[in-house]
Image (cartoon, helix red, strand yellow):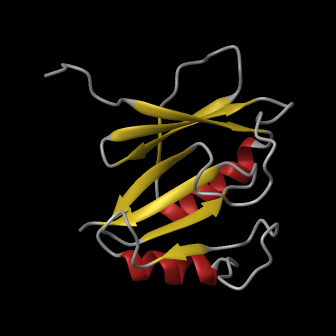
Amino acid sequence: MSDMALHHVSIVTTNLERSLAFYRDLFQLDLLQRPPFAISGAWLDCGGLQLHLIVNPSGTFRDNRSVDYTDGHFALRTNDFEGFVKRAIEMGFKEDADVDDPSRLLVVREGAAGFPQVYILDPDRNVIEVNAVA
């Protein structure tokens, strides 16, 4: 057995204020103290683990602009899946949005994973999965 544990996930952003608002409002994450690094960014608490936002004016390396569950992504788990879907819709995400629309909400309520999943894009088009406790 490994003594490794996930500590944080880092997400590239081109606009820190916009991304902070997105992650705090949609996922209800709290801001953490961050050391004064040479690059701008923010740390957020995510159930005892951390989500780090890192400013890079060039953005991410992703070529695929649509929400795609086969692309690199990270996943958050919730005890209130339908509540999260409702909050995402209230914030402007839509299940019926076009494939390339950044507000597309890709919901898989019954799939091979054995638990409900939803995929969205953050403001910099990073893919995020939110899934339900089985």
Please tell me in which quadrant of the rendered image residue 95 appears: bottom right
* Depth order, front residue of 112/92: 112
Please tell me in which quadrant of the rendered image residue 79 appears: bottom left
Residue situated furthest right in the rendering: 58
User: Residue drawn at (43%, 79%), measured in percent from left and top?
Assistant: 109
Q: Quadrant of the N terminus?
A: top left
* Depth order, front residue of 67/21: 67
| Left or right for 42, reference 64 | left
Question: How many numbered marks are there?
Answer: 0
Please tell me in which quadrant of the rendered image residue 62 appears: top right
Whether residue 101 is situated above or below residue 129 in the rendered picture: below
User: Residue 73 in the image: x percent, y percent?
Assistant: 56, 46
* Depth order, front residue of 93/108: 108
Residue situated furthest top in the rendering: 38
| Left or right for 72, reference 77 | right
Whether residue 52 is situated above or below residue 70 in the rendered picture: above
| Left or right for 59, reference 9 | right
User: Residue 3 in the image: x percent, y percent?
Assistant: 18, 19
User: Residue 107 in the image: x percent, y percent?
Assistant: 53, 75
Q: Quadrant of the C terminus?
A: bottom left
User: Residue drawn at (80%, 77%), measured in percent from left and top?
Assistant: 98
Whether residue 66 is situated above or below residue 54 in the rendered picture: below
* Depth order, front residue of 86/75: 75
